Amino acid sequence: MRPRPTKQFFSFLGPFGLFVLTVVAIFGFVVQTPAAWADFVVAEATKGVIRLIRAEGSLWNGRAELRIVPAELQLGGDSSSERQSFQLVRSVSWQVTPRLNSLALALKSDALEGPITQAPLLISFGSVLIPDGKLRLQSFPMEQAGGALALVRPQAALEIYWSGLDRPTESGQTQAVSVDIHEFVTSLSPIKPLGSYRVKLTGLHGQVSQGSRLSWSVASVEGSVISISGSGTLSDMVRGQLQFKCHRQCEFVNGLLSAIGKKRGDVYEAKLGI
């Protein structure tokens, strides 16, 4: 019986040839990994909060729509509810370049500004170093995060700034994220908008990147109908205390303030996560 062509082929290659063929096949598979795999990587890294939808290209060079799944934020809401998502960024593109001991991830999007558009993220085992930057979101329906937010149904435009995330965790430098809330509106008030506000998240020694033991504070921008001040911590749930005070047209916002806080004099107070 004549040997089969397949057996002849592998006999001809020998052990070294088989090894080279295997390496080439694996390399080809890795290089051609579809962009949809990037969604899996991002979903795992963010515990399902952020997703890449309609991905095109490859894992190494592609583009997609950036969406958020609010139920997974677990900000006092029911994480078992229906997984509805909404668009954060219409289009974001990426390019991954392997380095000696890390991966360089370059991002491009009309919603991104600052050094992050010029310098890549550096991803290594156990750490991600992120250049300073800003992300602009034209509309963010915050009520979808659940909890008390679902009651007041707020919406706003957001500008998210971050700094210090490009330093190693042992640097001891403060890492900070600020969220500017513009044109804040809610279904419980006929006054639109109610004002603009800034939320700050801070941490030390890499706590921002770990997503735990963060401190937060919030303050209103001058001229807002309702002034807000508050602070607390953030882990799996927002915890802390808030104070609200109306400055004009108060008859139109008393219902809103009563719904979210307890009145003490001319100030409304609320506790989160208690």
Image (cartoon, rainbow, N blue to C red):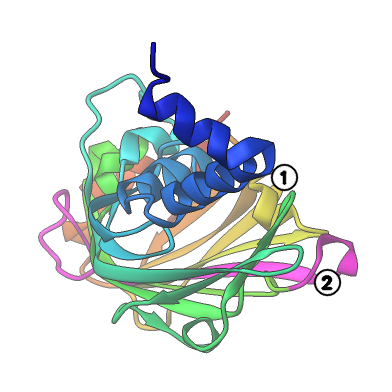
Q: Which residue is mark 1?
A: 213
User: At which x and y percent is residue 14?
Assistant: 63, 37
Give the SS element for disc 1. loop
Looking at the image, which residue is at 61% across and 44% down? Answer: 17
Q: CA distance from mark 1 to mark 2?
A: 15 Å
Amino acid type at circle 2 is: Gln
User: At which x and y percent is residue 176?
Assistant: 65, 68
Q: Which span of residues is magenta-colored?
A: 167-195
Which of the 4 image quadrants contains residue 90?
bottom left
Give the SS element for disc 2. loop
- Which of the marked residues, 1 or 2, is nearer the chain's N terminus? 2
Q: Is residue 257 visible?
A: yes
Looking at the image, which residue is at 75% across and 68% down? Answer: 100
- Magenta highlight on residue 182: yes
Q: Is residue 262 visible?
A: no
Looking at the image, which residue is at 25% across and 65% down? Answer: 156
Image quarter of the N terminus: top left
Amino acid type at circle 1 is: Arg
**Observer-nearest of 237 and 268:** 237
Q: Is residue 43 above or below residue 228?
A: above
**Observer-nearest of 54 and 143:** 54
Q: Is residue 152 above or below residue 207?
A: above
**Mark 1 nearby-residue class (10 Å; few <14, some 14–19, many ≥20):** some
User: At which x and y percent is residue 41?
Assistant: 47, 45
Q: Is residue 274 above or below residue 3?
A: below
Q: Is residue 222 above or below residue 249?
A: below
